[in-house]
Amino acid sequence: MMIAEVSGKFDLSQDTLRYYERIGLIPSVNRNKSGSRDYTEEDCKWVEFIKCMRSAGLPIEVLIEYVGLFQQGDTTIEVRKELFIEQRKQLLTRMEDMKKTLERLNYKIESYEQSVVKKEKELKRSED
Amino acid sequence: MMIAEVSGKFDLSQDTLRYYERIGLIPSVNRNKSGSRDYTEEDCKWVEFIKCMRSAGLPIEVLIEYVGLFQQGDTTIEVRKELFIEQRKQLLTRMEDMKKTLERLNYKIESYEQSVVKKEKELKRSED
DNA sequence: GCTTGACTTGGTGTTAACTCCAGGTGTTAT
DNA sequence: ATAACACCTGGAGTTAACACCAAGTCAAGC
């Protein structure tokens, strides 16, 4: 799979894909004879995984660490688990914050609806 | 209320509080005779509101727009409502992303637990 | 009246995460 | 074989959201 296709498939710019690879956020992708990247199925899975993690706000630095640990093999499983547990904890905190904010937005929107209704009633009265 | 107290109360640096005010993210705070900021109850409510919105990832730019609209009075209620509806939509999207990521993290962590258990069993066998 | 400490402003510096660009190489179509 | 195109690399530029700093002012304690 050429980079253009991967770019389209995951809605990430080619620059971003190259950037991710350069900083070690995904393992390095093999090149074909002419030097272009040729993504394997495995590579695509990495890209998709990273995209998912990033979309939830996991920092790049942490993900780079994970990729590094992964590449070091089974001896790092325990550390990787701890890393994920920590990230899950932080994710849950962020989700809680968002839940509170969501309720607040809902309340605000409802209030505004009320005040619009009031305005309309006033208008109707003035039309009489 | 002096800035130090507000800073402590909301766990925001004084620099951040001044920054927020400077860019119009909170309405400007009155000064006492010696020129220092003196936060009213109202000011604190703004700070708390902004902190809540920021913690859920609403961009500063959007919040500045909201504060501007708010200060223009009731004629902007409809616009403010739309603004919040849009932000709520985006917030829900982010929350969905996070939920998926959370499930994935949970799965990874569980898998790692399994592989640790396996390792331990192997160890036990080799002890026999 | 002098130091100490909290505050002020205006401006510069920093970090994360991309994003863009120039200059070069290889492939493909006419 | 020449133009058009996709891709490469190394490096510089951008944006959001702060964080830091210098130089100055003000009030309080000794």
Image (cartoon, coloured by chain):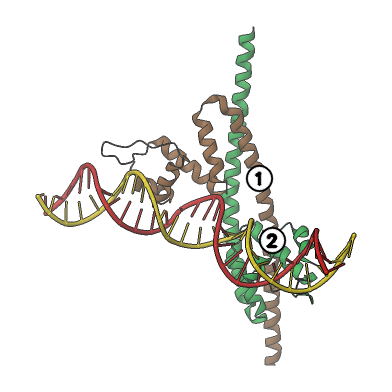
Chain colours: A green, B brown, C yellow, D red
Q: Is residue A36 above or below residue B79?
A: below
Residue B79 x, y percent position in the rendering? 61, 31
Residue B55 x, y percent position in the rendering? 54, 49
- Badge 2 element: helix
Q: Residue at x 42, y 35 (%)?
A: B42
Q: Nearer the viewer, residue B122 or B49?
A: B49
Q: Which residue is mark 1?
A: B90
Residue B55: give its label: none
Residue B121 x, y percent position in the rendering? 70, 83
Amino acid under disc 2: Lys
User: Taking A54 as reference, is B12 left or right?
Assistant: left
Is residue A68 in view from this perspective?
yes
Co-location on one chain, circles 2 and 1: no
Q: CA distance from mark 2 to mark 1?
A: 18 Å
Quadrant of the rendered structure where residue A119 is? Answer: top right
Q: Quadrant of the C terminus of chain A?
A: top right
Q: Chain of mark 1?
A: B
Q: Residue at x 63, y 28 (%)?
A: A113
Label 1, residues with CA under 10 Å away: few <14, some 14-19, many ≥20? some
Label 2, residues with CA under 10 Å away: few <14, some 14-19, many ≥20? some
Amino acid under disc 1: Gln
User: Taking A67 as reference, is C2 left or right?
Assistant: left
User: Taking A88 as reference, is B16 left or right?
Assistant: left
Farthest top residue? A128
Q: Nearer the viewer, residue D24 or A11?
A: D24
The answer to whether the residues at label 2 and label 1 have Cβ atoms under 8 Å apart is no
Q: Residue at x 35, y 45 (%)?
A: B3
Q: Which residue is mark 2?
A: A51
Is residue A29 in view from this perspective?
no
